[in-house]
Image (cartoon, rainbow, N blue to C red):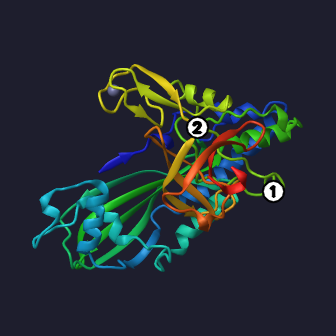
Amino acid sequence: MNSRRPDGGCDGNGGSGSGSGNDSGNDSGNGGGDAERRREREYEDVYARLKAYEGRAAAVAGVGKDPVNEPMIRHWCEATGDTNPAYAGPDAVAPPTMLQVWTMGGLSGHGERSGAYDELLGLLDGAGYTAVVATDCEQEYLRPLRPGDRITFDAVIESVSERKTTRLGTGYFVTTRTEVRAGGRLAGTHRFRILKYVPAKQRRKDGEREAGKSRTGHTSHTSHAGRTDCTGRGAAGSGAATRPVRPRPVVNRDNAGFWEGVSRHRLLIQRCTECGTPRFPWLPGCNSCGCPEWDTVETAGEGTVYSYVVMHHPPFPAFDPPYAVGLVELAEGVRIISNVVGVPHDRVRIGMPVRLEFERVDEELELPVFRPVGADGS
Ligand SMILES: [Zn+2]
């Protein structure tokens, strides 16, 4: 497996902290050369300290919480739709891609995480690289795991990259390599890479503050290409009094019509002009027949809660947990993920009839939400 996710990819703009690209955009009028050189030295100093962690242990003598077992294999196969007969029956092996599963600590965590890894993350936090996103993992399989295998593992901090500028922000890629053993024999390796970064948006705000501009000049566009970032935590020590804003939707050619509809308080569903299949969320083509032509229908706004989760943890900035996230089935036959409002989070139920309304979140953002029919006089 080598699942490289595009959102963490480096745009090749960074390099060795030379202040190139995005980084220099906020620096004009900031004292020129001296400040630039001072910042350079700070970057070099941080990098040298980070680099010293390469080769140190990230986890020592880890023990899998459960042996390799059939129930977890079955759940995995059901969730991924993998019907390979090798994963069932008396001679079953575990899907190789489950390698990391057997090392996971669950909500209570693992005791074997090393002080060095925590120190490294703390150093990055302290230098302002407070946000984190997992970017990719690579696994190598040496021999199959079977139900009953007892798992042990060790992990090492394999590398810390130079300072890189990505579309998410500027930071450092940290790669750990875990060696997974069964009965003491190496079964596979799991290489996991994260980016610890200063969110691009945060940096822009800081720049404005330095330049003495008001926040009203700040644009709502994020530099994220394809998704909102749910892992960023906002840089340390910045703007504690300013409430973080909800993530901005990424509006592109494929979904601009949807957001244009929202701005007019109309929730528009795409409909294939070839086969008539409605679809949501908005996509360039029909999942049923592949036809790229479509028109729209406006939902009447009636639906039912098809499923829901109540978010308690982790607490994302700008959200107040616990809150209910519903998967609402609209009468027109599509489902939409949204908030269920106007009802306590623990009163939301599957099958609950709900009606569309539009909620103004802030100056720039309005979102379709759903309120139980009968709540608040509706
Ligand atoms: Zn179609």
User: Ligand 1 shows up in which quadrant of the image?
Assistant: top left
At numbered mark 1, what does the secondary structure look like: helix, strand or loop?
loop
Rendered location of residue 250, percent (x, y): 58, 35
Nearer-N-terminus badge (2/1): 2
Quarter residue 290 falls in: top left
Residue type at tag 1: Ala
Q: Which residue is mark 1?
A: 240
The residue sitting at 65% across, 41% down in the picture is 367
Residue 133 lies left or right of residue 182; in this view the side is right
Residue type at tag 2: His
Q: Residue 312: in sight, yes or no?
A: no
Residue 207 lies left or right of residue 338; in this view the side is right
At numbered mark 2, what does the secondary structure look like: helix, strand or loop?
loop
Mark 2 and mark 1: Cα distance apart in space: 23 Å
Above or below: residue 118 compared with residue 43: below
Q: Residues within 10 Å of mark 1 (few under 14, many from 20)?
A: few
Quarter residue 188 falls in: bottom left
Above or below: residue 305 compared with residue 60: above
Q: Which residue is mark 2?
A: 224
Q: Residue 336: in sight, yes or no?
A: yes
Asked whether 262 or 56 is in front, the reply is 262
The residue sitting at 37% across, 26% down in the picture is 276
Asked whether 204 or 274 is in front, the reply is 274
Rendered location of residue 304, percent (x, y): 51, 51
